[in-house]
Image: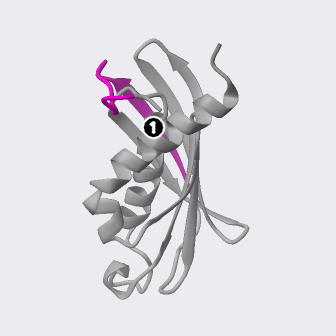
Amino acid sequence: MVTLLDDQRLARACADAMWSTDRASKGLGMTLERVEPGRAVLSMTVRAGMVNGHGICHGGFISTLADSTFAFSCNTRNVVTVAAGFEIDFLEAAHLGDVLRADGREVVLRGRSGIYDVTVRRGDTVVALFRGRSRSLGRPILEETP
């Protein structure tokens, strides 16, 4: 019988395997704060190279934080899963030095397809809302499961 603890260990092992080779997220200074089945939390501080000509964080960096959070959320069950598409709505600007925290959660998983929502916040303020559509590729992330 599979327990919640087993599911949590599997989610963490999948996240650790992905994180070990994720140069993009690490290169942008992201931190993987939490992972559990169907859910992940990542954070990122807005750095000087992320600020656009209007003096605010470029939306592409906010999208990337949300997309990385989406990736970790939908890869917790030891099946390689990729984005089929996403939409993002920007609600507030982020500025140099802001710490952005993205909280992703599974909304629905049916067969090889899933929908995940990610909320990006600066403190209590919602900066962006992201909805991602996933597609699993049917192969394992880990060679051996924990």
Residue 52 % position (x, y): 34, 80
Q: Quadrant of the N terminus?
A: top right
Q: Which of these two is toward me, 25 or 35?
A: 35
Task: Name above or below for residue 79 compared with residue 68.
Answer: above
Residue 103 % position (x, y): 60, 52
> Which residue is located at x 32 percent, y 55 percent?
20
Total count of labels: 1
The extreme right residue here reads 124
User: What color scheme is it?
Assistant: one colour
Q: Is residue 82 magenta?
A: no
Task: Name above or below for residue 44 compared with residue 38.
Answer: below
60 horizontally vs 106: left or right: left
Residue 33 % position (x, y): 56, 60
Q: Is residue 136 magenta?
A: yes
Task: Name above or below for residue 20 compared with residue 134.
Answer: below
Q: Which residue type carries mark 1?
A: Gly
7 horizontally vs 52: left or right: right
11 horizontally vs 142: left or right: right
The residue identified by callout 1 is 132
Number of residues whose C-alpha sits closer than 10 Å to that of mark 1, classed few (under 14), some (14–19) or many (20 or more): many
Residue 70 % position (x, y): 46, 44
Q: Which of these two is toward me, 4 or 133?
A: 4
> Which residue is located at x 32 percent, y 34 percent?
82
Say which element carries label 1: strand
Residue range (magenta): 128-144
> Which residue is located at x 43 percent, y 67 percent?
30
Task: Name above or below for residue 63 compared with residue 95.
Answer: above
